[in-house]
Structure formats: structure tokens, C-alpha cells
Image: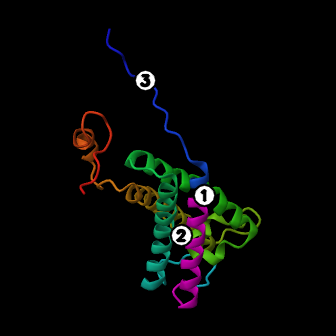
């Protein structure tokens, strides 16, 4: 009787590596945001205004959101010592999942503004019921929500790509099909040439 593989395959999580990756993402994001303020790239406006947004501000905002999580995903996968892209990508995505509540806590504390205006939608919004409807306020809230959603999704893409890069496997979608054949029938990678 042939042995059957289990339907369930466990992917263990290296939580210390994930925590270091999340802290790396926050630190790199803060540094990029502060450099953006120092060179005048990040505007100190309370909300995102698409009509007056400068290109340098957009580059720092998108770059900060993306590369902070690339660094976080990369750090988590490297610290965990992951050599397969699938588990490295999973660790990068978990870094992102852990960092989002941290960003919400920073927004609640009122210090998320140091990361630039890109995450402005995470901060508390004024109540529209208390005042007369203001179309400018509604537009500002919409712009903040769009910018924040874009920053969070770019962060997820960055974390996944950072984990994938740290695995050392080729960044192609078809590599997993030939990986085991390249490693041999034992599933262990051959030693590097001398």
C-alpha cells in the first residue's frame, strides 16, 4: 500500500522574525517620512489633495509605503532563515498584518503624521453629523481613504516581495514547478560547486 501525504501541511511561523520585520517596517517608514519632511517632499497638510500634490511628495509617499515593507518582509525572512519562497512570502505578509494594527495605534496616539500624509486615513475623522455637510471635508476624507488604502496595499505588495527576495529563489511564478527536479529526488539542494 502506497503511503499518502497528509492533506494538511504545516507552515511554522518564526514569530520573533515577524516581530523584528514589523519593527523594521515601522522604522524604515519613519526614516523615509522624516527625510521627506527634511527635504520638503512631504507636505504638512492635514489631508491629501490630489490637485496640489507635488511629484516629489508622491514619490516619497509611495516609496515610503512600499520600501518600508520590503525591508520588513526581507528582514523577517532572512532572520527566520527561510529558503523557500512560499514560506518567505507568508512571513512577509504576516509582517504586514502585524504592522497594520501598530499603525492604527500610532494614529490613535497622534504621531502617525511623522510618516507623512499618506496614512492620514487611519486617523480619526471628524463627525459629519455634528456639523453642516461640507463638500470640502467630504472630499478630504475620500482622498485620505484612497491614499491610505493605496499605501496599505502597496505595503502588502512590498512585504511579499521583500520576503520573496530574501528567500534567494528566482522571482518567477514557474520556479516551483522545476525546483524539486533541480534539487534531485531527495528534496535536498545539491551542495554548491567548489
How many other residues sit within 10 Å of disc 2, few (<14), some (14-19) or many (≥20)? some
Residue that badge 2 annotates: 143
View extreme (front): residue: 194
The answer to whether the residue labelled 1 contacts the one labelled 3, judged by CB atoms less than 8 Å apart, is no
Q: Nearer the viewer, residue 27 or 132?
A: 27
Q: Does residue 128 appear in this view?
A: no
Q: Give the x, y percent position of residue 92.
A: 49, 54
Describe the element under mark 2 as helix, strand or loop: helix
Callout 2–callout 3 Cβ contact below 8 Å: no
Q: Is residue 38 visible?
A: yes
Relative to residue 14, is residue 140 depicted above or below?
A: below
Helix, strand or loop for disc 1: helix
Q: Residue 187 at x, y = what percent? A: 31, 36
> In 3D space, how far apart are the residues under numbered discs 1 and 3 (Cα atoms)?
32 Å
Depth check, mark 1 against mark 3: the one in front is 3
State the CA–CA distance, disc 2 to disc 3.
45 Å
Residue numbers of the magenta segment: 20-42
Question: Disc 1 marks which residue?
Answer: 100
> Which residue sits at x=24%, y=40%?
177
Say if the magenta span includes residue 26: yes
Question: Which circle marks residue 56 in the picture?
Answer: none
Asked if residue 160 lies left or right of residue 29, the reply is left
| Residue 75 forms part of the magenta stretch | no
Q: Earlier in the sequence, mark 2 or mark 1?
A: 1
Q: Earlier in the sequence, mark 1 or mark 3?
A: 3
Front position in the image: 188 or 128: 188
Which residue is identified by label 3? 7
Judging depth in this view, the residue of 73 and 47 nearest the camera is: 73
Amino acid at each position: 500500500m502506497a503511503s499518502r501525504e497528509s492533506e494538511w501541511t504545516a507552515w511554522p511561523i518564526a514569530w520573533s522574525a515577524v516581530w523584528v520585520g514589523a519593527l523594521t517596517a515601522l522604522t524604515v517608514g519613519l526614516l523615509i517620512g522624516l527625510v521627506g519632511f527634511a527635504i520638503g517632499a512631504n507636505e504638512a497638510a492635514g489631508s491629501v489633495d490630489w490637485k496640489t500634490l507635488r511629484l516629489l511628495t508622491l514619490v516619497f509617499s509611495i516609496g515610503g509605503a512600499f520600501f518600508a515593507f520590503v525591508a520588513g518582509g526581507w528582514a523577517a525572512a532572512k532572520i527566520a532563515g527561510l529558503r523557500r519562497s512560499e514560506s518567505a512570502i507568508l512571513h512577509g505578509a504576516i509582517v504586514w498584518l502585524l504592522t497594520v494594527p501598530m499603525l492604527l495605534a500610532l494614529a490613535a496616539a497622534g504621531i502617525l503624521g511623522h510618516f507623512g500624509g499618506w496614512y492620514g486615513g487611519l486617523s480619526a475623522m471628524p463627525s459629519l453629523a455634528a456639523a453642516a455637510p461640507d463638500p470640502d471635508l467630504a472630499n478630504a476624507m475620500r482622498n485620505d481613504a484612497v491614499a491610505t488604502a493605496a499605501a496599505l496595499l502597496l505595503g502588502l505588495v512590498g512585504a511579499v516581495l521583500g520576503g520573496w527576495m530574501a528567500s534567494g529563489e528566482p522571482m518567477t511564478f514557474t520556479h516551483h514547478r522545476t525546483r524539486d527536479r533541480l534539487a534531485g529526488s531527495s528534496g535536498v539542494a545539491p551542495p554548491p560547486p567548489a
